[in-house]
Amino acid sequence: MKYSNFIRLHWAALRALLVLTVVTGLGYPLVIWLVAQLPGLHDKAEGSMLTANGKPVGSRLIGQLFTDSSGNPLPQYFQSRPSAAGTGYDPLSSSASNLGPENIVDTAADPAQLAAGKSASDAGFKPSLLTQVCTRSAAVGQLEGVSGSRPFCTGGGVGAVLSVIGTRDSRGNVVAPTRVVSVNEPCQSTQTPFLAIYEGVRVECAKYGDDYSIGQIVPIRGAAPANPAVPADAVTTSGSGLDPNISPAYADIQVARVAKARHVSPDQIRAVVAQYRTGRALGFLGEPTVNVLQLNLQLDHQYPVTG
């Protein structure tokens, strides 16, 4: 290749690089920014921020907690659904728990570490998805004054799961139990399992360090209703961990508590809830929802808590 051709080709490449840099690195972003300033688009482009007393308090697209410094729910506010994103609704840690429906056996805490003053999590306790759901359901039920019972949960708020040990049939099912253990109820926390007898065998509570995987893991449905008073979104996290909405059913069971804290009637609170309830997209996609932040901001404006 002649030297003149080499220079000509590289000069053309450099000019193309400069033109594309200007078009894609400066021109295109500038056009998009200008479009975002159009009325009706500006708020969305700025993150759909909501303000109170002139100060930004959050985005209507990202959920947040309404708790005190100790993590206790503030009674005057509607509560959001649980979040697995960081410590809760952290946009930099958007995620789910990645636990599936078969995750029903807890990892027990070391009793020696508990006796030494460590927290359950620091002592190795890892609740299963089922126990997380049961615990949350019991807590929400107590907060809202409704039954927190739900299928496959014990009265103590953990997964009602047995390890059934004995002779198995060709399909692997135990047909002649010789020992039955309540795997999510360690002896140091309770001496009375949620179920006394299973198929004629006395149920034991679990002992730390013992391996019960040899048995058939059997969840026990119990007598809880098929449609619990505490709805599913009150006890499960969203896929992103940032869901800003709750179901109308979850909002409905919170009305009485919020009305009492704000010294107004439940009907007055329900009227505000209705303002922030949205239906299915296009009339058939998704489920009806209530935006928690918008609802709580309106309640502060309309029925502020005083004293």
Image (cartoon, rainbow, N blue to C red):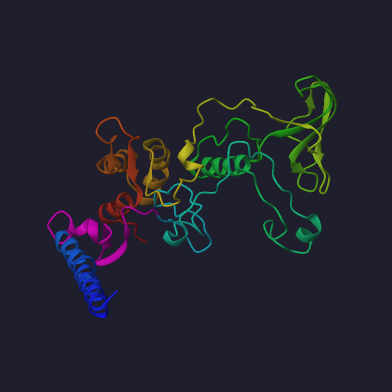
Q: Is residue 263 magenta?
A: no
Q: What stretch of residues is rendered in magenta?
A: 36-63
Of 226 and 148, the residue lying toward us = 226
In the shown orientation, is residue 188 left or right of residue 218? right
Q: Residue at x 48, y 52 (%)?
A: 95
Of 203 and 306, the residue lying toward us = 203
Q: How many numbered dots are placed on residues in this image?
A: 0
Quarter of the image with the N terminus in it: bottom left
| In the image, farthest residue toward the left | 39
In the shown orientation, is residue 49 left or right of residue 157? left
Q: Position of residue 222 (x, y in %)?
A: 65, 27
- Above or below, 85 against 207 in this view is below
Q: Residue at x 55, y 37 (%)?
A: 148
Quarter of the image with the C terminus in it: bottom left
Q: Position of residue 88 (x, y in %)?
A: 48, 57
- Above or below, 253 against 165 in this view is below
Q: Position of residue 18 (x, y in %)?
A: 21, 73
- Write down the quadrant of residue 122 in the picture: bottom right
Q: Residue at x 16, y 63 (%)?
A: 31
Q: Is residue 38 magenta?
A: yes
